[in-house]
Image: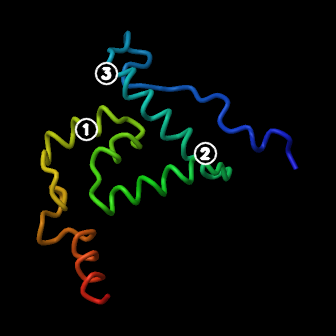
Amino acid sequence: MDAYRYMGVSLICAVGPSEHIGLPTIEDIRSECAVFSMVKHSVNLARGFKKERERDYNLSLARKNFKWEEQFSLSIDSEHARKRFIELNNSNEDHCSMCGKSFCAMRNTKKAMDSVV
């Protein structure tokens, strides 16, 4: 077995929208860092890193239970997630703005499961 297999991501080069055109803006660099973090997380998940898997599991539970602040803290780009939430949702209710209250899959599944028990 390759000795480096479990070392995780060691080097990824970020390429952004300003590449070979001009100097990047702060927002360019920020988005490149977020993409880098997503790639790093994906590779480390594929390599079986327990901590990465636990983070995804906890994020899934937070989504399922509409624990918005916990979702933000576990997100790869917490600041961006919070900003988009405020722009699109800005509600601490038990649904998001994508499907709305009537069609929210998480909310309706919970309601169905509660009625079975």
Instruction: Name the spot of residue 82 as percent of width and height, x first.
Output: 25, 38
Task: Using the image, determine if residue 102 lies above or below residue 47.
Answer: below
CA gap, disc 2 to disc 3? 24 Å
Q: Which quadrant, please, contains the C terminus?
A: bottom left
For image coordinates 15% across by 57% down, the residue present is 93
The amino acid type found where label 2 is placed reads: Val
Precedes in sequence: disc 3 or disc 1: 3
Q: Residue 24 or 63: which is nearer the viewer?
A: 63
Task: Using the image, determine if residue 117 lies above or below residue 90.
Answer: below
The amino acid type found where label 3 is placed reads: Glu
The amino acid type found where label 1 is placed reads: Arg
Instruction: Name the spot of residue 62 as percent of width and height, x first.
Output: 36, 55
Q: Which mark is residue 82?
A: 1
Give SS at disc 1: helix
Q: In the image, is 92 to the left or to the right of 1?
A: left
Task: Using the image, determine if residue 11 lies above or below residue 54.
Answer: above
CA gap, disc 3 to disc 1? 16 Å
Q: Quadrant of residue 77?
A: top left
Q: Which mark is residue 43?
A: 2
For image coordinates 39% across by 20% down, the residue present is 29
For image coordinates 14% across by 40% down, the residue present is 87
For image coordinates 32% across by 14% down, the residue present is 25
Local packing at callout 3 (Cα closer than 10 Å; few below 14, some 14-19, many 20+) is few
Local packing at callout 2 (Cα closer than 10 Å; few below 14, some 14-19, many 20+) is some
Give SS at disc 2: helix
Q: Residue at label 3?
A: 27
